[in-house]
């Protein structure tokens, strides 16, 4: 089964509650997909299907971008750790030249399907872009501060790039404690299968550059 076939077989087109303008191939039941993916991928060691869910940080960022299209219109925009591609699709809808960076082949397949479902073009980059020379005007990162090594490595790079950097974060453990400017807060409906509550207050931050 190809990644595209797997995505189609295990998801349904659904609009995230905070972003009704966008339809995504999302899991309708969490546990069966997780188990199926583990069985499908255990020999090649790909990560769990984060791409099959609209996480709070990405939902908040997508909402903010759609409500403030002037931030991205006509600009080169990177959605880092794109997952479903929600944020990249929002940027493309707002008039950006959007790229989704995602190293998971199944996520890349989901992004292709989701972009097509929303009639937008999103370029996909499957290499690790952390540390790369910045080729973007805006970098968007939703819900990427859940694991210390990744968060520290990512934020260290993002503080140095000559781009506008926005983070969407629902209070994950490793979001930076300083060097942030609050732009917006949203209450994002969540699933008890994924979170410990029915909604999460989620912030959109501008990450300040190193002095």
Image: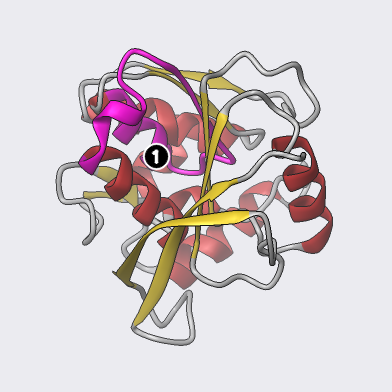
Residue located at (60% from left, 32% from top): 105
Does residue 1 appear in the picture of this structure?
A: no
Which is more toward the observer, 61 or 147?
Answer: 61
Q: Against 85, is 11 above or below?
A: below
Queried whether the magenta region covers residue 83, the answer comes back as yes
Q: Position of residue 13 (x, y in %)?
A: 23, 46
Residue at 66 percent across and 54 percent down: it is 179
Which quarter of the image is occupied by the C terminus?
top right
- Point out the residue furthest to the left here: 21
* Residue appearing at x 70%, y 37% in the figure: 158
Tell me if mark 1 has few (under 14), some (14-19) or many (20+) residues whose alpha carbon lies within 10 angstroms of its own: many
Give the image location of residue 100, x and y in percent: 51, 28
Secondary element under disc 1, as helix, strand or loop, is: helix
- Along the viewing direction, whichever of 17 and 151 lies nearer the viewer: 151
Identify the residue position indicated by label 1 in the image.
87
Instruction: Give the image quarter of residue 80.
Output: top right
Asked if residue 80 shows in the view, the reply is yes
Q: Considering only vertical position in the picture, is 196 above or below 54?
A: below
Start-end of magenta stretch: 67-92
Of the pair 165 and 103, the residue shown nearer to us: 165
């Amino acid at each position: 089964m190809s990644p595209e076939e797997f995505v189609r077989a295990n998801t349904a087109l659904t609009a995230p509650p905070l972003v009704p303008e966008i339809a995504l191939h999302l899991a309708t039941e969490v546990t069966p997909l997780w188990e199926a993916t583990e069985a499908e991928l255990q020999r090649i060691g790909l990560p769990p299907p984060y791409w099959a869910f609209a996480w709070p940080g990405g939902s908040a960022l997508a909402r903010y971008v759609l409500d403030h299209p002037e931030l991205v219109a006509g600009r080169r925009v990177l959605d880092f750790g794109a997952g479903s591609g929600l944020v990249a699709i929002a940027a493309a809808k707002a008039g950006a030249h959007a790229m989704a960076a995602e190293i998971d082949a199944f996520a890349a397949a989901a992004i292709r399907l989701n972009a097509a479902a929303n009639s937008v073009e999103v370029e996909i980059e499957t290499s690790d872009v952390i540390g790369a020379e910045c080729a973007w005007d805006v970098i968007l990162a939703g819900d990427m501060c859940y694991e210390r090594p990744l968060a520290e490595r990512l934020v260290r790079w993002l503080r140095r790039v000559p781009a506008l950097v926005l983070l969407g974060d629902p209070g994950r453990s490793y979001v930076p404690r300083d060097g942030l400017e609050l732009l917006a807060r949203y209450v994002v409906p969540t699933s008890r299968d994924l979170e410990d509550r029915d909604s999460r207050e989620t912030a959109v931050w501008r990450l300040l550059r190193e002095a």
